[in-house]
Image (cartoon, grey):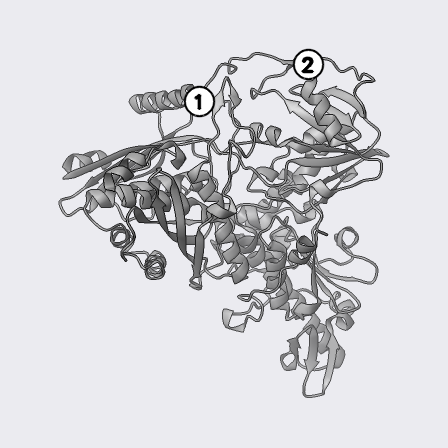
Amino acid sequence: MKKWTRRAFIGAGVLAGGTLVIGIAIRPGNRSSKVAGLIASEGETVMNVWLKIAPDNTVTAIIPHAEMGQGVHTALAMMLADEMDADWSKVKFQEAPADKEYANFTLLKGFVAGNATFPKFIEGTIDGVFLTAVKSLNFQITGGSASVRFTGQQAMRIAGAAAKSILMQAASDTWKVPIEELIAKNSIISHPRSNRSATFAELAPAAAKVNIPTQPKLKSPEEFTLMGTSQPRFDIPAKVTGEAQFGMDVQVPGMKYATIKASPVFGSKVKSMDTTVSSSQQGVKKILNLGDAVAVIADSFWQAKTTLDVLPIEFETTENSGLNQEEIIDRYRNAMDSDLAEGNLDTHFKDGDATTAFEEAAILVEAEYQLPFLAHATMEPMNCTAWLHDGKCEIWCGSQNPLGVRAAAAEILEIDIDQVTVHNQLLGGGFGRRSETDVIKQAILIAKEVDFPVKLIWSREEDTQHDVYREATISRMKAGLDQSGLPIAYAHQFIFKHHPPEAADIPYSIPNQLIHYSSPASHVPWGNWRSVDHSTQGFLTESFIDEMAHAAKQDSFAFRKKLTRDNSRFQRVLDLVYEKSNWGAPLPANWGRGIAIAQSFGSIVAEVAEVEVGIDGKVKVHRVVCAVDPGFAIHPNGFIAQMESGIIYGLAAAMTGEITIENGAVAQSNFHNYPVTRMNEAPKIETHIINSGNPPGGGGEPSTPVIAPAVTNAIFDATGIRIRQLPISKTDLRASIRQTT
């Protein structure tokens, strides 16, 4: 845990959106009126930017992250309330406004520096740099599995502890008793010796005038009362009753609907169209040329869509208009070949002399893998409601990036960002897609042309064909083994490196490594996809390590254990998944068991998949056993739900997920040709958590990278066929089963 000093507090000013530098609190003389105006109602006392106390003793946690099913509002409130010793039955949450005061300082700092500590004399300077950066970048992001591990650890806990400290100080000053004799419990400060007590609400006005401590004492895990328990989630009741409001549910008086048709080929523009609204187009208000798309505004979405479907539109032809998937992959391969031949590869990691070690190896293992483009396929289609009135702009949407939404709107409209208000809604799936602002920008352009609110809704087809995609990847891997089967060299050449930067690192103790990559041009737009580069690198590394184990004639589990012997966390996770999966136990004919492990976003996840390959070649995943070390699971049930969610999401991608390009455009259009895992296809999932005492890791993404290699390794166990190209559905497994039978 980072040690906060007075220098750090003064240097950074405010812990905003992920970091709370509590030393400069909400009080007259700094940002008191602004922050109070952002988050407080009449009678409420703002203790710091992260919490307020109402006269009825309700504590409200201000949460700077969007809720998209991950339970973040509950988990972060628990962290604050636990440190504060608040009565959980009187704790509520409020999502922070889209404002620079809540820019995610800690997330940016965490992404760059992780859990690193810094010398006290430079803490303030470092924090100040990150704070300035996030405000200038309008960085208020929910993503990177970072809410609990960065905002929770470095903001909410500190905010709660600091609030408790000043409440106790206020009681001490009021009652003239030593602070050491006071007890905080269930939102009450008591002094047993004098039999006096007061609620947080009664003490709050006086506490708000107390100097905030620069180093509030945090609880040890043994002292936790809320963290580590599975409290009822704030968001569930409204979702069960149907009262929860997502972006699609927004209704504004006088609102009309719009939908769009963009150029099928990325980068192409509208060449010709007819913007005339005829009397036969019932309910249609306006037809707009947005440059790369056509929009229709009507009384209903259906009227807008049916009009758009028959509207004669011609798009420009570009150099990419005839491009097909095979040509894209050929370009990637050619780039890899030329970069390798000309020495133009970018180096990710180099250790030792892999070239010489390969020459000395007794066994060489080589493989090429290919992964497809992937769409996000969120359940809630892309949408945004915008209204321009009185020189201002109001936006209703579900966004992972609400401050970025404000900035994008202000830029398009050429108005001050303070004139833009974002009403962030619940998200019906994000997975990185809703960190983008493309839909928002279109909604603003449409709203500029009318004097009423407009809800822009993308059709499912538009969403599938104009997403920002996980990159298609080619990988060439090579390993050299000695006579005993131990690896002595490892080389990996792949296409594209985005983030996190460590994704291509391997957890195995292998000397003489060379990992490098190429970055060829592509007209297909890239975007953050659940677990980002870990989703590709997890499959590549864990598929190839299995091939190495087979070449060494060693058990897949034992091989991984041997190569991670210096990493006690990996060893414990492997041992647990071995035990819980009953590794090595007999399976029915045509069944297989596969294992994979990876570390991402601060958590280590191992999964064992049990699969059956039918006589028709179809793969059925019956069971997935997941063992995970997240450091400490703040909300165990919520964490397990995220493990299950990540597995299901990754399983859909592994089994059938594929976006292909035909004549420059995306060929897939809806769930019939871009399917997701259905209920009857979902395996039984068992999740087992190790609370190792390390800092909390992420939960939303770490289970996704591991499921694909666990399943393909299980298919090899069942059939003897290696799956080196995803999705699995591209490989015909029928012959192997007939032969086995």
Task: List the residue tagged with mark 1.
Answer: 325
Relative horizontal placement of residue 729, taking residue 224 as reference (left or right): left
Residue drawn where x is 83% and y is 63% of the image: 43
Instruction: Check disc 1 and give the amino acid type.
Output: Gln
Q: Residue 369 carries which label?
A: none
Residue drawn where x is 62% and y is 38% of the image: 137
Please rate how many residues cluster around mark 2, counting C-alpha atoms within 10 Å: few if below 14, some from 14 to 19, many from 20: few
Q: Point out residue 688 in the picture as x, y percentages from the top left corner.
A: 43, 61
Eye-nearest disc, 1 or 2: 2
Q: Point out residue 292 in the picture as x, y percentages from the top left corner.
A: 64, 20
Task: List the residue tagged with mark 2.
Answer: 312
Instruction: Check disc 2 and give the amino acid type.
Output: Pro
Whole-angstrom CA distance, mark 1 to mark 2, is: 28 Å
Please rate how many residues cluster around mark 1, counting C-alpha atoms within 10 Å: few if below 14, some from 14 to 19, many from 20: some
Decide: is 368 above or below 584.
above
Rendered image quadrant of residue 240: bottom right
Residue drawn where x is 71% and y is 68% of the image: 90
